[in-house]
Image (cartoon, rainbow, N blue to C red):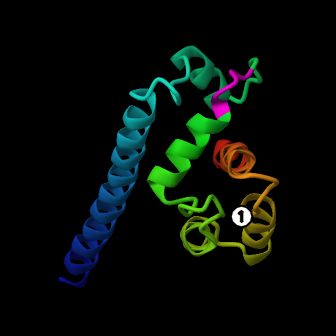
Amino acid sequence: MKYLVAFALLLTVASTLADLKEEAKQKIKVAHEKCQGNPETHVDEAVLEKIRKGEKPDHPQNLGAHSLCISKTLGWQNQDGTVNKALITDRATQHIQDAAERQKYLDECAVDKENEKATAINLFKCIGRYTRHQ
C-alpha cells in the first residue's frame, strides 16, 4: 500500500512538473506570436532558429526590439527595462540546484546593461547558454 501511495505521489509530481513545463512553453509561444505580429519587432524565423541552435547569424537591426518585446511580455524585464531580478532569481532557484552555479548564472544573466535592448539581448544569450548545457 505504501508503494502505491508513493507511486501515486510521484505521478502527481511528474504531472505537475509536465504541466508547468507546458505552461512555460505556452507563455513563450504567446510572447513569440505577439512580438512576431508587430512589424517593428518581427525577426525572420530562420535567424531566430539559428540563434536558438547557438549559431551566430548576422543580427537584424531590430533584434534588440524583438528581444525586449519577448522579455517584457514574459516578465523577465520590468516595464522600465530593468531586469526583474526577483523573477529571474526565482526561476534560477527552481532550475539550478547548486548554489554556486546559480549565483554564477545570476551574476551573468540578471544584469542591467547600458540600455533596455542590450539588457534583453544579454538575458537571451545568457539564458540560452545555460539552457543548452542542461
The residue at 20%/75% (across/down) is 4
Query: Is 14 placed left or right of 81 in the picture?
Result: left
Query: Is 33 placed left or right of 115 in the picture?
Result: left
Against 21, residue 11 (above or below) is below
Image position, residue 63 (x, y; %)? 65, 31
Q: Secondary structure at mark 1?
A: loop
The residue at 64%/67% (across/down) is 96
Image position, residue 3 (x, y; %)? 26, 78
Against 44, residue 91 (above or below) is below
**Front in this rendered view, residue 127 or 112:** 112
Judging by the rendered image, the residue that carries numbered circle 1 is 110
Q: Residues within 10 Å of mark 1 (few under 14, many from 20)?
A: many
Against 54, residue 4 (above or below) is below
**Image quadrant in which you'd find residue 99:** bottom right
- Residue furthest to the bottom in view is 2
Query: What's drawn in magenta, residue-wise?
Result: 59-63
Q: Which kind of residue does numbered mark 1 sit on?
A: Ala
The residue at 49%/60% (across/down) is 75
Against 30, residue 44 (above or below) is above
